[in-house]
Image (tube, rainbow, N blue to C red):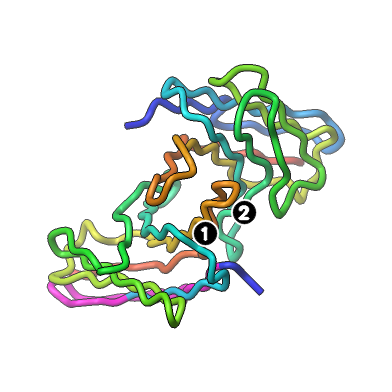
Amino acid sequence: DAGITQSPRHKVTETGTPVTLRCHQTENHRYMYWYRQDPGHGLRLIHYSYGVKDTDKGEVSDGYSVSRSKTEDFLLTLESATSSQTSVYFCAISETGSMNTEAFFGQGTRLTVV
Amino acid sequence: RKEVEQDPGPFNVPEGATVAFNCTYSNSASQSFFWYRQDCRKEPKLLMSVYSSGNEDGRFTAQLNRASQYISLLIRDSKLSDSATYLCVVNTNTGNQFYFGTGTSLTVIP
């Protein structure tokens, strides 16, 4: 299995509080991604990174920010959590943009905003 | 319009049956195609890549039709352990973004 670790694995937080999720990889892959997965929507891209300090928005980026200060770490921050951000969050990594290069996923973080 | 569309199912089939899943994608510039498998409350994992000429891996066969922008997955001789959600995934290679279908649920019944 690819070396991807997400922390925490489970979190319950209150509306309006800041939350940071961490993704750590040991594969030295260039690309890192944050997705959320909700029933009926599948996996939707929040933000992604194509290098240290190089990030871009995905389709559901509102309310989220990211940072990548080192190759191995990609942080997702909810500045002020809302109930609509209750979801399962997956981090993924990919080595290059070449054809047929797959994405590897972390085990997910289950976030509940109450 | 969604980048990737799949029939969500569910598909409930007996052991030994053959089942086919279909998927369409909207971006004609898409270059890479995959089927992922996701077990309940687990992360998605690669089942197989899909090549233009079609490819087979044991009981699993994947096909790509670029003209129709259509991808398929065929599972022969279904096993109980095949029960999972199957995700169709497309990558445009521009920005290396992966787009996921909502998944098709399969339950194989004894």
> Where is mark 1, residue-wise?
B100
CB contact under 8 Å: marks 1 and 2: yes
Q: Residue furthest bottom?
A: B68
**Part of the protein shown in magenta:** B4-20
Q: How many marks?
A: 2
In the image, residue B41 sits, relative to residue B101, either above or below, namely above
- The amino acid sitting under disc 1 is Phe
Which SS class for mark 2? Answer: strand
Mark 1 — on which chain does it sit? Answer: B
- The amino acid sitting under disc 2 is Arg
Residue B55 seen anywhere in this rendered image of the structure = yes
Q: If the image is split into quadrants, where does the C terminus of chain B sit?
A: bottom left
- The residue at 22%/56% (across/down) is B81
Characterize the local packing of mark 1: few (<14), some (14-19) or many (20 or more) Cα atoms within 10 angstroms.
Answer: many
Q: Position of residue A81 (x, y in %)?
A: 80, 38
Q: Position of residue A49 (x, y in %)?
A: 63, 35
Using the image, tell me which numbered label, if any, was put on residue A44: 2
- The residue at 42%/24% (across/down) is A27
